[in-house]
Amino acid sequence: MNAQQRGFSGNRCFKTHNMTIGARNRVIKNIYQLVTKRRSFLILGHKNPDEDCYASVAACALILRKFGKHVSIFWEVPPPENLKFINSICKYNKVNVYYTTMPTIKSTDVLCILDVPKPDMIAADGCIYDFLNNPAIPCVELDHHFDSDAAYSGDPDYALVLHASSTCEILCRLCYKLANHPEIRQRYSIEELYSRNLVLALLTGMLGDAKMGNYLATVHDKEVFDYFSKHLNLMLRISTRSENTQKIASMEKLLNVLETSDAETEKIYNLIMNQAVYTGRIGRVILSEADSVSFFDAIDYTQFLGMIKVATNAIAEKSGGVGISVYYDSPKKSNKIQCRIRLCAAARGVDLHPVLAHFKITDGGGHPGAIAFRLPHDFDTPLDVFFTEIESFIRETLLP
């Protein structure tokens, strides 16, 4: 059984447009009613979790704990070394954290699905599938993906899907609303809404998905990102004691932590960067299947995902335009070829989504400045040829 077999598949529709103000306010009101009336919450993210997945799940848990709720979270795998502080934050705030295998629990009052583009990407195990298939359990969804095949996982009355830099940014908007309702905070004795741990989690997701706003296409998106990130950065600085230099005290230091790697990961990063080829304002690296397998044998899967993301960003910055990375996925995960395309900071404002439409790619999506997609293992066009065509399209159609 998989998540697509949940009973709501008949009325599920694709995520094609942003919600109206009236619709989002109705959904927020419905979610608040659930929070006030229900006691236990189970929060899920997506398979192959990234920074925004880990951080948004954790941030949502912290917010629910402020309301005195019993909260459990499930991640497919533990956070990598540079994100272990997210795990510590959850445990410090008495959130039940489960990885890989979910123990049998009797039930949960509410399911929360965060940062999941479509139902078959929900990371789940064991009894979680029973909960997903139980129409009596309300399912809240918070997400920001509007991809070619993105589809709703949550119940229509509780699905808050908005154009945003990250799911953590959506949580920032909910916190902003909560901050403007002192009567609610007083009712639940929430003395410190923006606790340091919550601020750190929210910033982690925002920086992980949008870096410093480099992947955002419109002026409005960048303005919203800047508003929340600057306020969170200020709160992080104020809440971190200056004498404790080991603590993450600013957005810049947090970004450094997110991009930190160990010696073996650094070695593989350098090997990948040395294989990059640059043509004009586009750089690309295509890893052979043998290289891909050897790298997965050398380092943890989640470490590789973080590292290839950083490498693609670095290739984009070095090219002054676009970075492309291609590798064969671990056989333990999928029988796919994974592909990433990223813009450099100087090319902000370019939308990469037309690549997916032009080449009729349905298994993929992302943000305007950062897309990812998957190809079948037996893809019938040589990868060099296919990505040369993509480069030509980007150069002739998208790059100024």
Image (tube, helix red, strand yellow):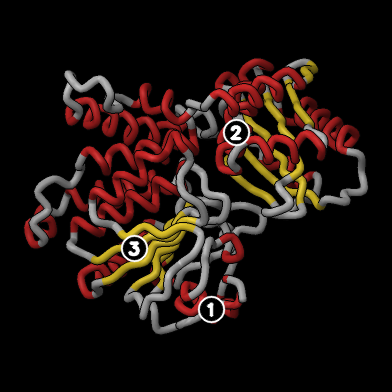
> Which image quadrant for residue 65?
bottom left
Pointer 2 with pointer 3, Cβ within 8 A: no
Rendered position, 282 above or below 90: above
Tell me the residue that label 2 is attached to.
309
Question: Residue 220 appears at what percent x and percent y?
Answer: 44, 35
Say whether residue 400 is visible: no
Nearest to the eye among marks 3 and 1: give it: 3
User: Circle 2: is it few (<14), some (14-19), or many (20+) Cα within 10 Å?
Assistant: some
Tell me the residue that label 1 is attached to.
8
Q: Image point 20% across, 70% down: which residue?
A: 36
Q: How many marks?
A: 3
Residue type (three-letter) at the residue carrying disc 3: Ser
Residue type (three-letter) at the residue carrying disc 1: Phe
Which quarter of the rendered picture does the N terminus lie within?
bottom right
Rendered position, 359 above or below 185: above
What is the CA distance from the residue labelled 3 to the residue labelled 1?
23 Å
Looking at the rendered structure, the secondary structure element under dot 3 is strand
Tell me the residue that label 3 is attached to.
72
What is the CA distance from the residue labelled 2 to the residue labelled 3?
29 Å
User: Circle 1: is it few (<14), some (14-19), or many (20+) Cα within 10 Å?
Assistant: some
Question: Residue 346 appears at what percent x and percent y?
Answer: 58, 19
297 left or right of 81?
right
Looking at the rendered structure, the secondary structure element under dot 2 is helix
Looking at the rendered structure, the secondary structure element under dot 1 is helix
311 left or right of 153?
right
